[in-house]
Image: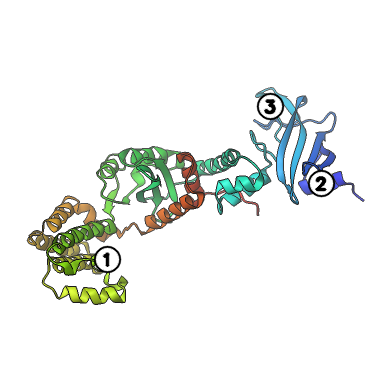
Amino acid sequence: MAGQEELFALALGVEEPIYIETVEFDKDKGELHIRMNFRRGARFACSSCGKANLPVHDTVEKTWRHLNFFQYKCFIHLRTPRTKCPKCGERLYMPPWGRKNSGFTMLFELLMLTLAKAMPVSQIAALIGEHDTKVWRVIRSYVGKAYVEKDFEKTDRLGVDETSTHKGHHYVTVFADLNDGDVLFATEGKGSSTIQAFADELPSHNANPQQIKEISMDMSPSFISGAKEYLPSASVTFDKFHVVKQLNEALDEVRRNEQKKNPLLKCSRYAWLKNPENLTARQKKLLSTLSKENTKTAKVYQMKLTFQDIYRNIYDIAVADTAMRKWLSWAIRSRLEPVKEFARMVKGHYAGILRFFESRLTSGMMEGINSRIQEIKRRAKGFRNIPNFITMIYLQAGRLSLPSLS
């Protein structure tokens, strides 16, 4: 019958010339300590270049935290050999369960990585009894390595959006592949410098700026200038939801000005701003009543519905161009300054707005990614620093090739 050392060796996959010397359980501390050694005269490969059959130069005592043994902490100790390679010099042997500069076995690290996909790092640290900085170090290492290996070769349609890191004017700009929804790149800040950073990152992932043919984004002037300068082959589509949002703002401004003289319009804001299919029964009844009034607000509401119908019902860019120009003429003749201001904005961004009718790109995918990012932030109750926040974005939304426990 095998002794406990042989049983643990079998369970841990320990192979000659390394062997388990002792297994000790510290009842007072609630810790299991597995102490390993290697056979006299054993030879090892260089941990840098892989040259085999090198003699042992000296040894260093190393310790790794392993998966718990039941509810008890488990530690692996090894009198670790150091070889002297003719090419690389002195190198410490790296056992199969370990990783350079880590005090955890790889299985324990993969447990942390798996938990990080479902719970905040602070909770993981409390659960395993380690400081959260150690947990972050492990997560950043695996995510960073997987991100470096991510291939952007097939990326040609890009979505760009900024998301807040926490309260205040602190942002991270996120770039996603609109073909499959993967987050490709995230960087601190917003504006043209973030697009430059993305373009600079592309060659590291088997890609180049010239392969980006389509971009969907909002009408930020700095995004526009950045795309023009750093992604020159890309056609820009201004997101239709951002465009309609600005028309809704014009509608609401007209309502606010008009309600000063017409109290019937008070408390009706959401009835005008919602799409008809999203109205509650009460809002439908209110809107039916108010629409019969000869108000400026009702007029702009009809203009909004007509504008949305252009997006919804037209699929040919030439037909869309004609319909859009007719609508703009109507808006300019409306004599309502908020609507005229919106029309001037559309004219100033006309090519990017009309581009939708060829690219059909929207921010729907980016909004979904942003929702996931905000959920990450809420679950963690904020992040100590932006690099950690970006690491978690890649982990959750980057579709990285990461090792797993299974």
With 154 as the anchor, is 18 left or right in this view? right
Q: Residues within 10 Å of mark 1 (few under 14, many from 20)?
A: few
Image position, residue 259 (x, y; %): 16, 64
Q: Amino acid at mark 3?
A: Arg
Q: Residue furthest right?
A: 1
Q: Earlier in the sequence, mark 1 or mark 2?
A: 2
Q: Report x, y in % for residue 228.
A: 26, 42
Say which of 156 and 21 sits in front: 21
Q: CA distance from mark 1 to mark 2?
A: 67 Å
Looking at the image, how many numbered discs can be counted on the residues? 3
**Quarter holding the C terminus?**
bottom right
**Label 3, label 1: how many angstroms apart (C-alpha)?**
69 Å
Is residue 314 something one can see in this rendering?
Answer: no
In the image, 8 versus 245, the foreground residue is 245
Which numbered circle lies on residue 270? 1
Q: Position of residue 373 (x, y in %)?
A: 44, 52
What amino acid type is highlighted by mark number 2?
Phe
Q: Amino acid at mark 1?
A: Tyr
Q: What is the number of the mark on residue 91?
A: 3
Query: Mark 2: few, some, or many residues within 10 Å (few <14, many ≥20)?
Result: some
Name the quadrant containing residue 88.
top right
Determine which of the numbered discs, if any, sits on residue 8 in the image: 2
Q: Is residue 160 left or right of residue 102?
A: left
Does residue 26 sit above or below 328 in this rendering?
above
